[in-house]
């Protein structure tokens, strides 16, 4: 055991957070936790985890669940492809693997949505397989301590990092090792302003000794976020509104929303009220425009949504295609993107 691993294990034994998935070797529960926590803070993901495993305690209950119920359970967590992939993976385990969660890394990777990180986490924690996990915390910790100067998002950088994590692996308890490394990266070797002077690894940490803590890990790419312009239509008739399901291969797939127009540029109010979708939705009616909202900014990882909501009081409602008419009291039964959910909560409920 090296000084590096010895110190982190010692720290982990004294400082690890009491999290429900740390007290189990059940691969299903570990898989659920790791999937929920992708791109999600533990404080945000924890209540979702409790609700999820309360409703779907095993792979069979998840596989049998209606998709709309699953999406409603996931509402507000974002990255909805995770939920769809989990559903597909659960059905694969039940229908093709006899309901038994695969133990081997290669078979775990066959499951929809299971990448290298999740496969390594489940294989090591549930089954004691010596596969090191590599996430943002691990990348930051190893890049700083070992002085990995190749950009972490290049093939060479990834290979160097993978080699270092394999060298550090504790083959007697891989799951414990992986959790200790991730926890230390999450709580101590943090992205900004880490407490390096209090860290017992500082005397052997490349980044600290060379004044590079704020520079590592290096990265080559910075993805420009796409700006999109959404115009949502709230059509009301007494206690009813129209909603539609997003069925295309795009963000928020299989969630519900208000009827939507996407434009390539910002539209003036006159253009909002005279475009083809407005004419289609109004179907010859001439209702008064209740309100056009200010532009709302909603940020996703790779996209920025600039949204406006147009509210009409309609004499009657007509729905076709993937649109349906619902009573306002039923809104809570449907899964909406946070942007739409927040608007409805502040508008329809008042």
Image (cartoon, rainbow, N blue to C red):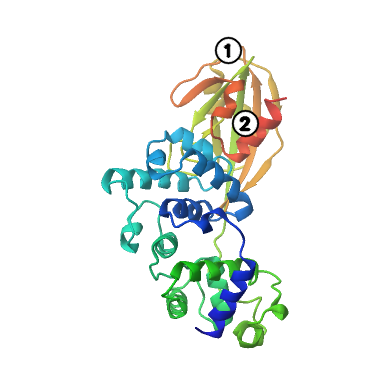
Quick check: 300 above or below 321? below
Looking at the picture, how far across and down is residue 305, in whole percent? 60, 45
User: Disc 2 marks which residue?
Assistant: 272
- For residue 269, the mark is none
Residue at point 54% right, 61% down? Answer: 223
Q: Secondary structure at mark 1?
A: loop
Looking at the picture, how far across and down is residue 199, in whole percent? 67, 79
Residue at point 37% right, 45% down? Answer: 90
Residue at point 55% right, 28% down? Answer: 333
Looking at the image, residue 280 sits to the left or right of residue 195; the answer is left
Residue at point 62% right, 19% down? Answer: 236
- For residue 316, the mark is 1
Quick check: 145 above or below 287? below
Camera sees residue 113:
yes
Camera sees residue 217:
no
Q: Secondary structure at mark 2?
A: helix
Looking at the picture, how far across and down is residue 48, in whole percent? 56, 45
Residue 262 vs residue 267, the one in the foreground: 262
Q: Earlier in the sequence, mark 1 or mark 2?
A: 2
Looking at the picture, how far across and down is residue 12, in whole percent? 59, 70
């Amino acid at each position: 055991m090296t000084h590096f691993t010895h110190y982190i294990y010692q720290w982990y034994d004294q400082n690890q957070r009491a999290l429900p998935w740390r007290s189990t070797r059940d691969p299903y529960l570990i898989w659920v936790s790791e999937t929920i926590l992708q791109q999600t803070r533990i404080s945000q993901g924890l209540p979702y985890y409790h609700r999820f495993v309360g409703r779907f305690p095993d792979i069979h209950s998840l596989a049998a669940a209606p998709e709309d119920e699953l999406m409603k359970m996931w509402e507000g967590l974002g990255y909805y492809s995770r939920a769809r992939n989990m559903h597909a993976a659960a059905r694969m385990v039940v229908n093709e693997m006899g309901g038994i969660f695969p133990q081997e890394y290669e078979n775990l990777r066959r499951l929809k949505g299971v990448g290298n990180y999740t496969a390594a986490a489940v294989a090591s924690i549930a089954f004691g397989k010596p596969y090191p996990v590599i996430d943002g915390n691990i990348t930051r910790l190893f890049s700083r301590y070992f002085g990995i100067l190749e950009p972490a998002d290049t093939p060479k950088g990834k290979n160097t990092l993978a080699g270092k994590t394999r060298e550090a692996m504790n083959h007697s308890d891989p799951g414990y090792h992986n959790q200790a490394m991730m926890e230390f990266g999450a709580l101590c070797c943090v992205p900004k302003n880490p407490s390096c002077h209090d860290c017992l690894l500082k005397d052997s940490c490349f980044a600290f000794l060379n004044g590079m803590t704020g520079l590592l890990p290096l990265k080559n790419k910075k993805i420009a976020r796409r700006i999109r312009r959404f115009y949502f239509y709230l059509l009301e008739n007494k206690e009813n509104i129209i909603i539609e399901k997003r069925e295309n291969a795009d963000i928020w797939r299989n969630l519900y929303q208000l009827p939507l127009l996407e434009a390539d540029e910002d539209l003036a109010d006159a253009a909002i009220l005279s475009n083809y979708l407005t004419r289609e939705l109004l179907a010859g009616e001439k209702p008064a425009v209740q309100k056009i909202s200010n532009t709302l900014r909603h940020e996703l990882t790779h996209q920025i949504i600039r949204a406006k909501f147009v509210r009409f009081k309609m004499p009657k409602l007509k729905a076709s295609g993937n649109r349906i008419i619902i009573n306002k009291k039923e809104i809570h039964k449907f899964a909406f993107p946070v942007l739409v959910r927040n608007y409805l909560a502040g508008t329809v409920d008042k």
